[in-house]
Image (cartoon, rainbow, N blue to C red):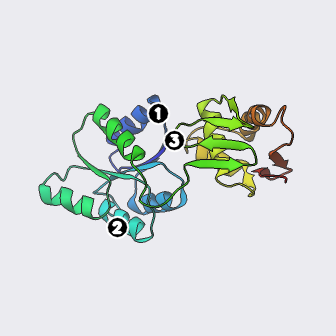
Amino acid sequence: MKILVVEDDKRTLSFVTRGLSEAGHVADAVQDGTAGLKAARDGEYDVVILDRMLPGMSGLDILQQLRSEHVRTPILMLTAMSTVEDRVEGLESGADDYLVKPFAFSELLARVHAIARRPPTTDVPVKLAIADLELDLSSRKVTRDGKRIDLTPQEYKLLEYLMRRAGKTVTRTMIMEHLWAIDFDVRANIVDAHMSRLRAKIDKGFKCELLRTVRGVGYVIDDPG
């Protein structure tokens, strides 16, 4: 999963992002409330971990603003404010869960996984399909013409990202921002290498190519028919 962590305490931020990365997730870190709101709006995150007390804009204000804009990304509020009234206020403002500091990372990770699994409040597709290529979002199974295609976790994320934008050109920068953390040193040739391996798996040996290179720009996946 790609997870945004909005936390101004450097020690807590390092602890959480390192743990998430070690658990196989991509974790982006933001220390300011205003920047956190922008990242949550503009980024495509599976979960947001949000501190309540932040410089620039409080976590509660961020939460309320996102929900008023119909941003439905699951949000775990992380805070030292531990009274019943504090927890109720956070949950009623739109938080999906509320964890009080200090906390065990194993519990944080379990809660992140739990809210990511919850059914969305709005209708979303269970499967993505382009021509005879299908991606099952619940089982993470990928098939083409009924044949199972085995992908690495990174290839799966790349394919899902492309299929959600079927027919639209996706730049290398967009791919880098979605698949890798902000501070990860990734270059365009790494994106091209991943794309080459993905194309070999989903297009080679089938009757038509779905994944195309848009020269000088990026990539697009669509049904040529």
Decide: few, some or many residues near mark 2? Use Cα within 10 Å; few <14, some 14-19, many ≥20: some
Which one is nearer the viewer's eye here, 225 or 40? 225
- The amino acid sitting under disc 3 is Ser
Q: Residue at x 39, y 48 (%)?
A: 118
Q: Residue at x 36, y 46 (%)?
A: 115
Mark 2 vs 3, N-terminal side: 2
**Label 2 – label 3 distance at C-alpha:** 29 Å
Local SS, label 1: helix
- The amino acid sitting under disc 2 is Gln
Q: Residue at x 75, y 31 (%)?
A: 201
Decide: few, some or many residues near mark 1? Use Cα within 10 Å; few <14, some 14-19, many ≥20: some
Which one is nearer the viewer's eye here, 49 or 128? 128
Residue 57 is at least partly visible in this image:
no
**Label 1 – label 3 distance at C-alpha:** 22 Å
How far across and how far down the image is residue 56, in percent? 37, 64
Q: Is residue 169 left or right of residue 34?
A: right
Q: Which residue is mark 2?
A: 64
Quarter residue 69 falls in:
bottom left
Local SS, label 3: loop
Which one is nearer the viewer's eye here, 166 or 7? 166
Decide: few, some or many residues near mark 3? Use Cα within 10 Å; few <14, some 14-19, many ≥20: few
How far across and how far down the image is residue 130, in percent? 72, 49
- The amino acid sitting under disc 1 is Ser
Question: Which one is in front in this view, the residue at disc 1 or the one at disc 3?
Answer: 3
Q: Which residue is mark 3?
A: 138
